[in-house]
Image (cartoon, rainbow, N blue to C red):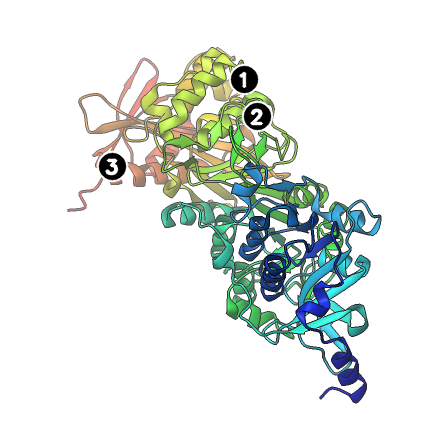
Amino acid sequence: MFSQEVQKLYASKRATPDEVFQRIRSGRKIFIGTGCGEPRYLVHLIVAYAENHPKAFFDASVFQVFPAKSVAGLEGLGPNFKMDSFFVGGNTRALVNAGLTDYTPTFLYRVPDFIRRGYVPVDVALIQTSPPDEEGRLSLGISVDIVRAAVEKAAIVVAQVNSNMPFVGGDALISLTDVDFIVPYDEPILEYGEILRSEEVSEKVLRKIGEQVAKLVRDGDTLQVGYGRLPNAVLSHLKNKHNLGVHTELLTDGLVDLIRAGAVDNSKKTFDQGKTVAAYCMGRRDTYEFINRNPAIELRAIDYTNNPVMVARQDRMVAINTVLEIDLTGQATSEDVRGPRYSGIDGQVDFIRGTALSVNGRTIIVIPSTGKGGTVSRIVPLFKGGVGATLNRADIHYVVTEFGTASLEGKNIRERALEMITIAHPRFRQRLIHRAINLKLVSEEHSFEEEKIGEEYPQELEALRTTKTGLRIFLRPVKINDESLVREFFYSLSEQSLYLRFASVRKDMPLNRLKEFLSVDYNKDMLILAVVREGGNEKIVGLGQYSAKKGSDYAEISVTVRDKFQNQGIGTELIAYLKCLAQKRGLSGFQAEVLMRNMNMIWVFKKMGFQVVDCVDGITLLKHEFPDEG
């Protein structure tokens, strides 16, 4: 129940459209609430008023952060309104490219300060709120972002009071005294799908990208997730995580689903523990119902959520965002691609810069490998003139496509190019290699046979194993971007290990020799790396391979283990795994040639079922026939 004082104050602020709009003069700066929180009824009223009063609002400026669909109706009123936006979306893209709407590129966390200092003047704020509580407080509901600053600065604040607007805490709470006019009107709150132009991404691609992202997110991380169907969809793959936190600009259905699933409890956050913090929410109706009067949800002003300094204070931040294109050096654009402007900077730069400074923070870009129905690669050689690099080469740690994950942090240009080519669509890899060679990003020696570089990396062959000594190793097929890892592995071997492996005193490993290990036709041959992580970096501790013998259903197998890790069961695990893969490929068995003096390796092979069949010129020949599973 409202107190009599609240009821009286509320009644005193109720107004008709005429009473409101007569107060707005020509040339005024009009702010309209954000995204799904847009006061659609007020926008409808102002459009109708302008149509009936052609000289009203002449040359007025209208601006938002994220325009929803009804604001576009103002554009048809000619000189009455000039629109401006801090973001380009599906509802304003055509208007921006036609020069009918302005776009202001900026870091979103700066906008409230621009408003307070008068760089972005606000004369009138049209907002949407919940009904007042018993203390006379209104809630800005699902849109706080820059709305709070606009309310504080505007000379006239007009609130559409809607009983469907969720009552949310944090910076969303304002006083009845902050509002000049109230226009009560109930209507459904806009849902995300109503303003989202669906991206053409298949469920298979979404699933593969989601599975890769799940490997990068750890229990106890705090998440920021960007705008778009793709970042939101990958969240469904995090439901088995524990103690995740949320500090984000946009609160999405996917994040709320994680809260419902128990994966998010915000218990490990550095600050705002126990609270999911965002600047605005766009989602389904059941998401709005979930956040209504939920004490664990707080919407805060965008200069709090997006400030890179605040983001950096949150340990183990993980920023998951998408872009339109990314080049081989790691530059990415979210704004335009060789043509009309498509989108805006939005808040991803705020979070990516802050996350890069966070203790154990990780920035992740998720992007389908192709666009336009698979006809163009979204990984390109280098950006051409006119394309805005929203993210620079130092911003991004990981890039994920449906073909794998590229790790860019700390990598030089050559290594980055190879990483990016590995996760490009196989159809475009050979072309990217040739362009990279022409641009001197990689050397001519990095040219690979088309059937090898164009083959899809078999992610399904990745496996975790524990050796007899308790060592956890990650087994995976080799990739062309493993050049530095494989080279370091061979140079780590002692002279004796090199001789026992290659029967040669040669110690160098130039690229033309290294390519024999990097380019594998997975359909015929296999090379598996045994990898451990040390200090956050991958290290190869073992390498096992088999090569199909021409005209035979047997394959030649060899195994090499880093000296420091020998006698820990790595060789045994590699042989067992290669055997499993070879059997699935229909091979009948393995053959091996081992120097007679390499007694340890001979013993390992015999333990794994190999039989000595001959000894010739100091070489022991071993053979292993796979059991007939029929």
Q: Residues within 10 Å of mark 1 (few under 14, many from 20)?
A: many
Residue pushed farthest right?
A: 117
Q: In the rendered image, is residue 557 in sight?
A: yes
Residue occupying image coordinates x 71% and y 45%: 358
Q: Amino acid at mark 1?
A: Leu
Q: Residue at x 36, y 38 (%)?
A: 373
Query: Which residue occupies the foreground of this view, 403 or 377?
Result: 377
Residue 488 placed where, x, y %? 55, 24
Question: Please, what secondary structure does the residue beneath circle 3 have?
Answer: loop
Q: State if disc 3 and disc 2 touch (CB < 8 Å).
A: no
The residue identified by callout 2 is: 329
Callout 2 secondary element: loop
Q: Nearer the viewer, residue 40 or 21?
A: 21
Considering depth in this image, is 590 or 344 the residue closer to the camera? 344
Q: Earlier in the sequence, mark 1 or mark 2?
A: 2
Circles 1 and 2: CB atoms closer than 8 Å: yes
For residue 138, above or below residue 370: below
In the picture of the structure, the residue carrying the numbered disc 3 is 585
Q: Using the numbered discs, state the Cα–Cα distance from disc 2 to disc 3 in whole angstroms.
A: 37 Å
Does 80 appear above or below 46? above
Question: From where the camera sits, is residue 171 visible?
Answer: no
Q: Which mark is residue 537?
A: none
Q: Is residue 447 above or below residue 5?
A: above
Q: Residue at x 49, y 53 (%)?
A: 196
Q: Quadrant of residue 9?
A: bottom right
User: Mark 3 or mark 1, which has the lower sequence index?
Assistant: 1
Left or right side of 222 for 498: left
The residue singled out by tag 1 in the image is 441
| SS for callout 1 | loop
**How packed is label 3: few (under 14 Cα within 10 Å), some, or many (20 or more)?**
few
Q: Position of residue 292 (x, y in %)?
A: 62, 73
